[in-house]
Image (spheres, coloured by chain):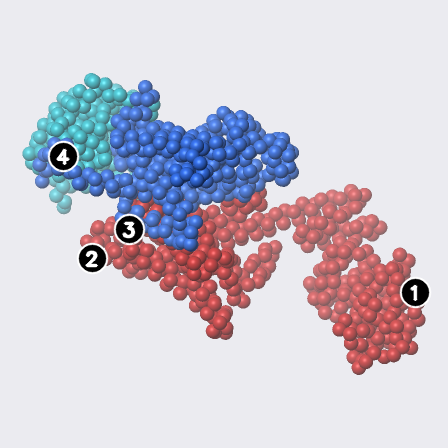
Chain colours: A cyan, B blue, C red
Amino acid sequence: MNAPAPGQLTSSLLYLDGVSVSFDGFKAIRGLSLTIEPGEMRAIIGPNGAGKTTMMDIITGKTKPDVGTVMFGGKVDLTKLDEAAIANLGIGRKFQKPTVFDFHTIEDNILLALKAPRDVRRTLFWNTAASQQKRIDDILGIIKLGDARDRLAGSLSHGQKQWLEIGMLLAQDPKLLLVDEPAAGMTDGETAETAVLLKEIARDHSVIVVEHDMGFIRELGVKVTVLHEGSVLAEGPLDQVSANERVVEVYLGR
Amino acid sequence: MITRFLLQNMDRRGYVFLGLIAALAVLMPLSNLLLPVGSAFHVPTSTMSLWGKYLCYALLAISLDLVWGYCGILSLGHGAFFALGGYAMGMYLMRQIGSRGVYGNPVLPDFMVFLNWQELPWYWYGFSSFPFAMLMVLAVPGLLAFVFGWFAFRSRVTGVYLSIITQALTYALLLAFFRNDMGFGGNNGLTDFKDIVGFNVQAQTTRAALFAMTCVMLIAGFLIARGIVVSKLGKVVIAIRDAESRTRFLGYRVDRFKLFVFTVSACMAGVAGALYVPQVGIINPSEFNPANSIETVIWVAIGGRGTLVGAALGAVVVNWAKTVFTSGFMAPYWLFALGGLFVFVTLFMPKGILGTAQEWWGKRRKPTPTAAPAPAPAE
Amino acid sequence: MLCLLRLLRSLAVAMVLFAPPALAQSAEEAFTRLNADSFSDTARAVDILIATAHPQAAPIIEALAESRLLAGGGAVVVRTREGGFIDARTGQTLPAQPAGLSPVRLNNNLRRVVQAALGGLGLLNPDASKRTLAAEAVFKSRDVSLLPVLEAAIGKETDAKARAALRQAQAAILIAKTDAPPFDRIAAIDVLRERGDQDALATLRSLPGDASQALKEAQTRAITEIEGRLAVWRAAQNLWYGLSLGSVLLLAAIGLAITFGVMGVINMAHGEMVMLGAYTTFIVQEIIRTSFPGLFPYSLAIALPLAFLVAGLVGIAIERGVIRFLYGRPLETLLATWGISLILQQAVRTAFGPTNREVGAPAFMSGAFELGGLAITWNRLWIIVFAMLVFASLLAILRLTPIGLQMRAVTQNRRMASAMGIRTGRVDALTFGLGSGVAGLAGVALSQIDNVSPNLGQSYIIDSFMVVVFGGVGNLWGTLVGAMTLGVANKLLEPYAGAVLAKIALLVLIILFIQKRPRGLFALKGRAVEA
């Protein structure tokens, strides 16, 4: 296992140790340990059912672990918080299936994600300040949807929705981004562009990327963690991990 | 600031609606009071009261549209908030009767004397004061909605489960209000009202004033509901309707937003009930009947949910049809028609009258797209 | 009073000196005295008739009490209530009224003697069940004058049940009789304690206030014990009512558990399927009444498959005609099926009228029996049995049959099932038909205990939803547990809160419960739930 020494604990942005969770007797995660350093970008791979999505559910508060520690920023216990509190701490999530608000315009989607007070009173009497409008425009530019800002998000193509969701993540300006299969359903060109975008984001954010596409991972060029049956099977640079016999075995079957 | 909040982004449809209601508020009472009975433009008092009732229903429909159309909460118990507002008003009106009741008791309403009660229950205190009663019209439905919603939304009861327990809520209240010892007149409810703020409830001028007041409240309710749905909070609420879990991951406390909208909506329904009672002259437990609440849903569905104006339109259209139907030889067929409406609207007109009309209108003047052409979709 | 004491003495003496040869002679003396036209002689005659246990004693004394006893010229004749005449000595019917007779007169004193004698007569009746009844009557009247007769009757009683009744009657008298030996009175308290019902409790409470300490203690102990026992029986009775209500709820809800639980379809017209089942029963019975009266005992058996078919076919029609266009839109389904329920109700109202229809009960469904301290009606018992049978068969259908397998497959993964060659549309229709058909079966059962009117279904729909939601969706066992829990909880709350408040309390509790466990008692967990 790759559990960090106790001294490292406070410096890690995200720290998972001995996390297990089961659904109706099925152990989706067993003794998972993982640390992400501030500013780090990490790719997570693993076959179906390895527990990747469940891991994200645990980090974002959707699922509570049966046992284990989940710490954020060295001092906040994420297992005690709900989704909204965790999101407001600075953890953003992009879902495997792109989920945008279909009946809102693209601009409104970004507006809703924009870092701002989330309480009822201040959302009711909200006015978009000029600086905030500029930030929205910037993000629309980054995700190349500036011209389509008034269209309903529901009318976007799959790839555009993926980008819109990444744009929403940017607007949230989180400390840590969890990105679930950003390249799924994209053309090669789009995949490459997404990789560039993610690398750009990773310059001032910590990012966890879950992906199946090895080419995409290679393009990111970051440390890889391989999950299998709910725990870490291997960790390291992609070349080293893909040479690992057990990883090959898991991916190709016996 | 409040004006700006209420009128932001007002569209043509909204102005038409406001204009129409404002015109009704002025013209109908004037024609009723000033024109001679024989005149072609004279509106009889009964017709005016009938329309007053429709407009109360319209306000109820708008309140339901706010939670269902925009927030996705299908409340099958909104009739309960309407009835509670109505009871609050009814209690005020009962206290105004004073010693003019059949038994002539200066404090106790007739039904309490009949039940041999010696003193006024504590929860009737204060209802002789109009401002207090009006506060209760808002507070009682609002508080119930708040408590109920606080439990329900916090534990993430959604969809049909929520619908079913809202139905159970109004059903429980129905059973409770039927009981004589609840102190709300049991089966007969509250009736035989005499005065409202010193004016005879039956008088033509009072009725005209009540009608105008209903229009004013409908306008106010519409403006508040509109203000909410076009604000950023409204966008959050729509986001909750379409992707609740995603909204939560953006950091919005979904339960609090739902609670806010639900409570505001319940208060609005309470006001509608309070205006309804003096105009129909009675409030009884049947208003809590779950069937009434579901009927309200169909008004909204027929008019077009998520449009506010459509909800009001649906309420007036369906109730007008009901009046026409049930007063003639077709009375036995009204339930067939109503039942058929439920099926027809859900199957063939999911967007309601207004939504369908809008779509149709949109198609006819399509040629000038405002949005930029979409980038080539990824393959 | 004197007169009474005399009667008692004579009765006691007569019992002790039970000697058949002397009888005939003594009885003859009675008839002579009845002819004497004097109140004291008449009283003496009554004594003798009782003491000698004359076979005609009962009709004679009854006739005397009602001024139907005629005497004159040595003859004594009873005029029957119907107006015939009977020779009092032999009991033989006389062809006509003999001449020269006049009624034997009564005064108040004599009336009392006659009443007491009548009570005592029953205790000596040759029929054991009549003796028991008479003893029960004495138990209630606590007529102290009958004590000697009672004691005599106990002495020669052979029937165990009658003996127990007699002893209880004796105890009831003794307990209030301050001059009885204290030992006997304590024994009496014991007898009453063993009897242990509400009447025994009332009798025990009648112990005079000036009783001795020992008696009072015994009384308190006995009362506590009886009250404890009665409370247990009451609880058991409420439990029984609860199970009965629970099985009714189960019947009403189990079809819903299939359509809502398995298919995710909110069928607000479910109650109307129950109503259709009840009306099918009504029609079947009407046809049987007019055309085949001999079949009436089988009417329910005939109605069951028909009700299943009628409700099932209507269900399939609804599914194919409306619901299938609304899959994935549960709120719209709810509204559309509500509309259908309005139409069905109005259709039935138009066809059969808005009033209640009479559905008869076959012999095996009527009546009641007692089990210990429980009163159990046959119709409730059969409904519980029927509910369990329906539950077991549904479980078997879902578990064991191919269509059950297909249903479960479609529930879990519609597209996959479709890819495997399952015709999902057909499965949907059949599942819905099954759920509706079961509701029809419920209607047959409910027609036996509820009013058959167009509103029948409406009164069950909210309760049924509560059961399914409480028990947890997609799990028939949850529905069973949910129905029974709600039924029993309702009936256990009722004695404290009254029927309406109990129901309200339960609704509120369920509302709170759903907050705690939004998916019911037996909910599935994990990722599948969110999908």
Task: Report how far apart the C-alphas of labels 1 and 2 lie in the structure.
Answer: 102 Å
Front one among A69 and C414: C414
Instruction: Give the SS element for disc 2.
Output: loop
Q: Earlier in the sequence, mark 2 or mark 3?
A: 3
Q: Residue at x 32, y 58 (%)?
A: C316
Q: Residue type at mark 4?
A: Pro
Find residue C411 and name its label.
3
- Residue C61 makes an appearance in the image: no
Task: Report how far apart the C-alphas of labels 2 and 3 lie in the structure.
Answer: 15 Å
Disc 4 crowd rating (10 Å Cα; few below 14, some 14-19, many 20+) is few
Disc 2 crowd rating (10 Å Cα; few below 14, some 14-19, many 20+) is few
Q: Are marks 2 and 4 in contact (CB under 8 Å)?
A: no
Task: Report how far apart the C-alphas of labels 2 and 4 lie in the structure.
Answer: 45 Å
Instruction: Classify residue C452 as left or right of residue A66.
Output: right
Labels 1 and 4 positioned on one and the same chain: no
Residue labelled with disc 4: B369
Given the image, what chain letter belongs to the residue carrying mark 4?
Answer: B
Q: Are marks 1 and 3 in contact (CB under 8 Å)?
A: no
Q: Are marks 2 and 3 in contact (CB under 8 Å)?
A: no
Q: Position of residue C165 (x, y in %)?
A: 72, 60
Residue labelled with disc 1: C40
Q: Residue at x 71, y 49 (%)?
A: C202
Disc 3 crowd rating (10 Å Cα; few below 14, some 14-19, many 20+) is some
Disc 1 crowd rating (10 Å Cα; few below 14, some 14-19, many 20+) is some
Q: Position of residue A106 (x, y in %)?
A: 19, 30
Q: Are marks 1 and 2 in contact (CB under 8 Å)?
A: no
Residue labelled with disc 2: C421
Instruction: Classify residue B342 as left or right of residue A56.
Output: right
Labels 1 and 2 positioned on one and the same chain: yes
Task: Report how far apart the C-alphas of labels 3 and 4 lie in the structure.
Answer: 43 Å
Front one among C78 and B309: B309
Task: Report how far apart the C-alphas of labels 1 and 4 lie in the structure.
Answer: 122 Å
